[in-house]
Amino acid sequence: MKTSIATVSISGSLTEKLEAIAAAGYDGIEIFEQDFIAHDGSPRDVGRMVRDHGLDITLFQPFRDFEGLPEPYRTKAFDRAERKFDLMAELGTDLVLYCSSCHPKALGGIDRAADDFAALGERAAARGMRVGYEALAWGRHVNDHRDAWEIVRRADHPNIGLVLDSFHTLARDIDPETIRRIPGDKIFFVQLADAPRIDMDLLYWSRHFRNMPGEGDLDVTAFMRAVMAAGYAGPVSLEIFNDQFRGGSTRGVAEDGYRSLMALMDDVRRTEPGLTLDMPEMPGRVRADGVSFVEFATRGDEAQSLEALLETMGFTKTGTHRNKAVTLWQQGEVRIVVNQETKGHAGATFNTRGTTVCDIGLAVADAGAVTARATALGTEPFAQPIGPGELDIPAIRGLSGSVLHFIDDRSGLADVWDVEFGAGTTPEGAGITRIDHLAQTMSYEDMLSWTLFYTSIFDMRKSPMVDVFDPDGLVRSQVVESPDGALRITLNGADSHRTLAGRFLSETFGASVQHVALATDDIFATAESLAARGFEPLPMPQNYYDDLAARFDIDPALLARMQTLNLLYDETDTGAFFQTYSRAFAGGLFFEILQREPGYAGFGAPNAPFRIAAQKRQRRSKGVPSK
Ligand code: MG
Ligand code: MG
């Protein structure tokens, strides 16, 4: 299976694009005319440059407004076609994409278009070229791949075939199963793109909002299953028009695309019976069973205040690393690792970001399988030197400099705490049982990368994106979670540096975990126990409780208790939810403690604006300028 990406999908100069595309592992590119019009070099030079990067030109595009024209436009269109064949010969490619006409003079008529393509086929054959016809979703007369196929079928020429594009088919809700009726050898090329479901003009939607398969809401997998079942054997190519990608990191977007393409084709292979695909084997998505540990890189005074905070939350220091300045804190199933090493990943992370979460350990069904899958999807494995008596725990590099370790029961990796920390049994705490979720913050542009990262490697689903209002701007929030809720991660995309999330990002130079949410089965008992230990919750104002009384039917005595303990509340038809927050420490990190009734699937989103406002008040009262 040959992989390819259209050069328009990513940012940068042509040279930068080629380097990033080759490094990410693609076999070829679709080249756009603009690429070499802007480039200082002849088409022959461009062709050589592409091949020097080990890449093929899989397709030249686009050729617009060809079919169905009256004279004298028709003759001119054929002249234009000949000039493009010249250009293709210089570039060293034999396949060109013709998109269905939007020309105001185009007359329509399946047979007229078929006759034009039959005549074009003769000219193409004489030059050793092939032409693929694509139905644009907004084409004037042809906007459906079934009509484009009928034109190709009637043109009946070996050098004329079809180009399928998942966006054009799925955006118009055309059943992708109809592709199974098309002979595979007449499908010359396949372009893939996903998109969020937004009700807007098709052309505008396509040119600005396409994204990588798996990042949007279209069923690209069903489309591709039908294409492969039809017997298609050509390149699988990404054609993504997206404003963020065009302004984003060249290398990052190329890598996301490769990850998305390999995950998609692996899904196709797994779900379409009777298909054998020539692509690397990889294990399927791995089940995540929860967060096994969260590791903070910290030092000095900040380390002391973090450890003091952990004590007031009922954690006990249960172990010290046999070789390193690292301590283990436990309560229930929760493990917090406090790493004060000056070397290695934690040391480097502290030096650039200050106290932050530098490592997340996930409990998974099979630690080896998850790293094998992640690596096959282009993720870098992570390793650092192993000290005496230490276990080699599989790990990968996440995004934004993060590291993820994987712990399973089968391989003895779960013994790491006994082996490396000499950890004994966990003493009684304040009732905290497990990590409910991690909240990660990133810039809005990076949100798609993070969702793709989690959903392509793990068996995790994403929720629709919701808006959270910060007094100083908007934060977009999306949840990725495993089907049983064992692993839940909330992703918060900050648009502005003035929001609390945005400020956290700038002050930590792009750290990701902003808060860790801890679950208890009885938040009243836990909050009282914490108060007795000297824990200082985030204070909530009287107005918040007045509003709760107005919105919900809460017993006044219970409400008064909630107010004393600074508990926040939410409920749905299926369950209730309580939460409380620590005060922020070390540049904006904080803990959340919550109790969810089994039927409550949310994260207290209605409370987020009040929480943010309370945190901003705290910040001001500590004399931190609010910019
Ligand atoms: Mg296309
Ligand atoms: Mg939360």
Image (cartoon, grey):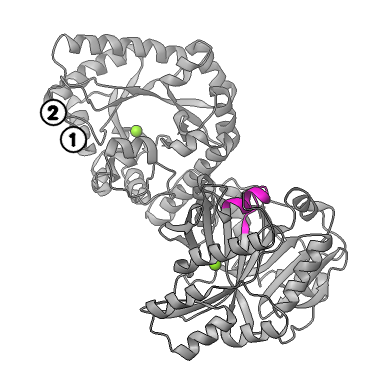
Q: Give the crowd class for mark 2: few <14, some 14-19, many >=20 residues within 10 Å.
A: some
Residue name at image x 38 percent, y 76 percent: 551
**Left or right relative to 435: residue 428:** right
Name the residue type under label 1.
Asp
Asked which secondary structure carries label 2, the reply is helix
Up the image or down, 507 lies above or below 484; here it is above
Residue 508 badge: none
Magenta-span inclusion, residue 332: no
Q: Give the crowd class for mark 1: few <14, some 14-19, many >=20 residues within 10 Å.
A: some
- Specify the quadrant of the image occupied by residue 75: top left
- Marks 1 and 2, the one that precedes in the sequence: 2
Residues marked 1 and 2 touching at CB (< 8 Å):
yes
Up the image or down, 262 lies above or below 145; here it is below
Name the residue type under label 2.
Ile
Q: Position of residue 116 (x, y in %)?
A: 19, 19
Q: Position of residue 576 (x, y in %)?
A: 44, 80
Say which of 209 and 275 sits in front: 209
Provide the residue span drawn in magenta.
502-513
| Whole-number angstrom distance, CA of label 1 to CA of label 2 | 8 Å
Residue 110 badge: 2
Say which of 543 and 410 sits in front: 543
Q: Ligand 1 within 8 A of label 2's CB?
A: no
**Left or right relative to 491: residue 86:** left
Asked which secondary structure carries label 1, the reply is helix
Q: Where is mark 1, residue-wise?
A: 147
Up the image or down, 383 lies above or below 546; here it is above
Residue name at image x 27 percent, y 8 percent: 79
Say which of 238 and 495 sits in front: 495
**Left or right relative to 359: residue 22:** left
Up the image or down, 357 lies above or below 47; here it is below
